[in-house]
Image: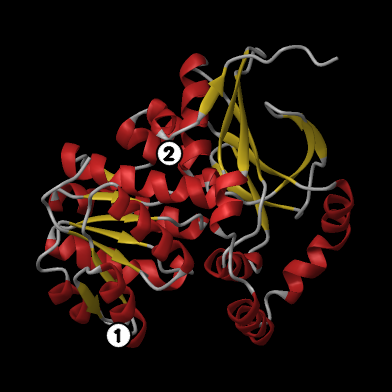
Amino acid sequence: MTTSRPWMIYGASGYTGKIVIEEALARGHRPVVAGRSPDKVRPIAESFGLPWAAFDLTEVSRIIPALADVHLVLHCAGPFIHTSANMVTACLARGVHYLDVTGEIPVFAAIFDRDEEARRAKVTLLPGVGFDVVPTDCLAKYVSEKIPNARFLEIAFASLGQSSAGTAKSAIEMSQRGNFVRREGALVPAPLGDNLHRVRFSDRERDVVSIPWGDLETAYKSTGIANIATYWAMPPTLARGLKVFGSGIVSAMQNDRLRETLKRFVDRHVDGPNAEERERGRSFVYAMARDAAGKTAEAWLETLEGYAFTTKAAVYSVERVLQENPIGALTPSLAFGSDFVLSIPTTKRFDSLPSMP
C-alpha cells in the first residue's frame, strides 16, 4: 500500500531506522530520511535515492520547520526518554502525526497524557508501533474483549535473538527505575526477576520472570484492566540470577557514569541481528485475562523475529494512519483493533493449544 502523502523516518542511521527504510521501499514508499547528523544521514539517503533532512532535537524551534512538508513522522531514535518529548511537541504544533517504536514506560505515559492536545490538533500520537508493543497490546486487547469485567491481565513473551544497540541503550537507561507491576490501577515497584514460573507458549513451555514491559502502560490504556503483570522468557539460570542480583543491578544502574560507560560499550560492540537471523527467528506471546470470579480467557501468538516484526508493523502503521486518520494519543489496538497484529505476515493467533504429552 503506497501513499502520496510525504512522511519522515527520523533516526534513519540507526539499526532500526535502516531496516525500516528497506521495508518502506519494498512497500513502494519514498520517505524523507532524517536524523541528527548530516554526515550519517546524507549517505543513507543517497544510497536509496531518497530526500533527507538533518536536525537535532534539542530545541522544538529547530524541529518545527523541518516538518513543514510531511504529514507524519516515524520516530526511531532512542532512548526515547531523551528524544521523544520535543518531537511530539513539534508534531503537535505542525499538525503532523507522530509514531514511534519505543517500549519505554515513561514515554508511553507522557504521550498518553497529551491526548487532549492531539485531539485539538487532529493528529495521531501512536507510540510503540514495533515489537514493543504491537503483538502484546493486540493480544491483551483480544483476551480482554472476551472477559468484559476482567480484573487481572498477565502477558508473557519470548523473542529469540539479540538486541540492537538502540534497544540495548534504552534498556540500560530504563534499568535504573527497576521493575514494576500494575495493581489496582497504579504502578508499584516489584523485585526485578520476581515471580519466576513457567508459561506454555505455542511451541513449548518456558521459564518467565517479571519485567517492566511497555504494556504496563499500553495494555492498561487499551483494556482498562487494573492489575497487570508482564513477563519475559529467559533461561532458568539467568532468571534465578536476575532474582538474586536484581536489586544490586538496579542500584548500580542509578550511577550515571556507569550507564554512560555501558552505552558507549554498546555503541562499539552491539550490531543487532543480521538479515538471516531476522528471517529465521520467531517470537511467541501469551496473554490471559481473568475476572474476580475466576473466569479466564487465554490466547497465544506466534510471529516474526522482533526486528523483522518491527519493520513491518511500523510501516503498516504508517499506512493505516495516513489512510484512516485516527485522532488522539492511542495504542496500536485502540488505533487499529486487536486483529491488527494478524496483518503481519506469518502471524498466527490461537485460542487454545493441544494438550501436551
- 306 up-or-down from 226: above or below: below
> Image quarter for residue 205?
top right
Question: Can you tell which mark lies on residue 221?
Answer: 2
Front-most of residues 213 and 225: 213
Lower sequence index among marks 2 and 1: 1
Question: Can you tell which mark lies on residue 38?
Answer: 1
Front-most of residues 63 and 255: 63
Q: Is residue 127 left or right of residue 239?
A: left
Residue for point 53% across, 37% down: 136
Residue for point 52% across, 16% down: 147
Question: Can you tell which mark lies on residue 91?
Answer: none
Q: Is residue 228 left or right of residue 83?
A: right
In the rendered image, which quarter contains the N terminus? top left
- 178 up-or-down from 43: above or below: above
Residue 70 position, x and y percent, is 14, 62
Please tell me how crowded label 2 is: few (under 14), some (14-19), or many (20+) other residues with Cα within 10 Å: many
Residue 165 position, x and y percent, is 57, 70
> Image quarter for residue 17?
bottom left
Residue for point 35% across, 28% down: 337
Q: Look at label 2 and name its amino acid.
A: Lys
Q: Secondary structure at mark 1?
A: helix
Q: Look at label 1 and name its amino acid.
A: Pro
Front-most of residues 121 and 44: 44
